């Protein structure tokens, strides 16, 4: 019921893709790192929950409302790792930046990725392929999104009513999972 149009990926489906991938890798205990107060992050979390429910694992999810910057995500994840009784073997991060912060914190806690924990991010930022290990992620097609956004903007300027565009996310499997 929004009055504006938007362009974005199917965040719920992206959360499902990430979680199903980790389930297929044998993960049975999960954590979601991201603050679900933002609608996009909330949808990613709902996708994660839906995939876990489908697998009969609704009680196997911890949530850390980590923020989207490395300066805030890394200390929060590090503190969480210090305090948790059981480190999950599957981490779904709401963004690549949060996932990279998790990779760093896990390395500092001598937790092997992907040996002990599998990590997957969201966005497929250009530097996701530069982490060690390289980061598995859910890709949002930024070029297609930008193209749709410009098209919708010009059509709106011309007076046309336009609908929102939801793009398909894509799973990109790399070493971290």
Image: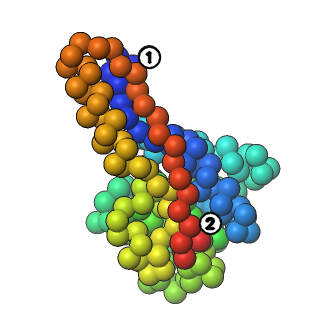
Q: Relative to residue 157, is residue 79 depicted above or below? A: below
Q: Alpha carbon of mark 2 to alpha carbon of mark 1: how far?
A: 35 Å
Q: Residue at x 30, y 42 (%)?
A: 146
Q: Relative to residue 92, is residue 109 depicted above or below? A: below
Could you say which disc has been placed on residue 1 in the image?
Answer: 1
Write down the quadrant of residue 68 in the picture: bottom left
Write down the quadrant of residue 114 in the picture: bottom right
Question: Outermost residue, right direction?
Answer: 56
Of discs 2 and 1, which sits in the foreground? 1
x%, y% of residue 128?
40, 69
Q: Nearer the viewer, residue 59 or 159?
A: 159
Q: Secondary structure at mark 2?
A: strand
Q: Is residue 149 left or right of residue 118?
A: left
Q: Nearer the viewer, residue 92 or 13?
A: 13
Q: Is residue 87 visible?
A: no
Classify mark 1: residues with Cα within 10 Å, few (<14), some (14-19) or many (20+): few
Q: Residue at x 48, y 70 (%)?
A: 135
Q: Residue at x 59, y 71 (%)?
A: 177
x%, y% of residue 95?
42, 57
x%, y% of residue 173?
56, 67
Question: Outermost residue, left direction?
Answer: 157
x%, y% of residue 87?
61, 72
The N terminus appears in which quarter of the rendering? top left
Q: Earlier in the sequence, mark 2 or mark 1?
A: 1
Could you say which disc has been placed on residue 90 in the image?
Answer: 2
């Amino acid at each position: 019921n929004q009055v504006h149009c938007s362009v974005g990926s199917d965040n719920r489906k992206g959360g499902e893709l990430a979680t199903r991938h980790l389930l297929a890798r044998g993960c049975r205990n999960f954590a979601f790192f991201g603050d679900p107060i933002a609608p996009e992050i909330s949808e990613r979390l709902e996708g994660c929950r839906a995939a876990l429910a489908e697998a009969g694992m609704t009680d196997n999810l911890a949530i850390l409302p980590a923020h989207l910057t490395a300066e805030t995500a890394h200390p929060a994840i590090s503190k969480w790792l210090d305090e948790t009784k059981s480190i999950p073997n599957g981490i779904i991060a709401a963004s690549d930046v949060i996932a990279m912060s998790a990779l760093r914190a896990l390395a500092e806690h001598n937790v092997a990725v992907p040996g002990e924990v599998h990590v997957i991010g969201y966005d497929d930022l250009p530097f996701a392929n530069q982490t060690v290990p390289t980061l598995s992620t859910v890709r949002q097609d930024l070029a297609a999104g930008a193209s749709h956004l410009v098209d919708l903007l010009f059509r709106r300027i011309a007076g046309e009513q336009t609908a929102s565009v939801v793009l398909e996310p894509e799973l990109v499997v790399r070493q971290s999972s």
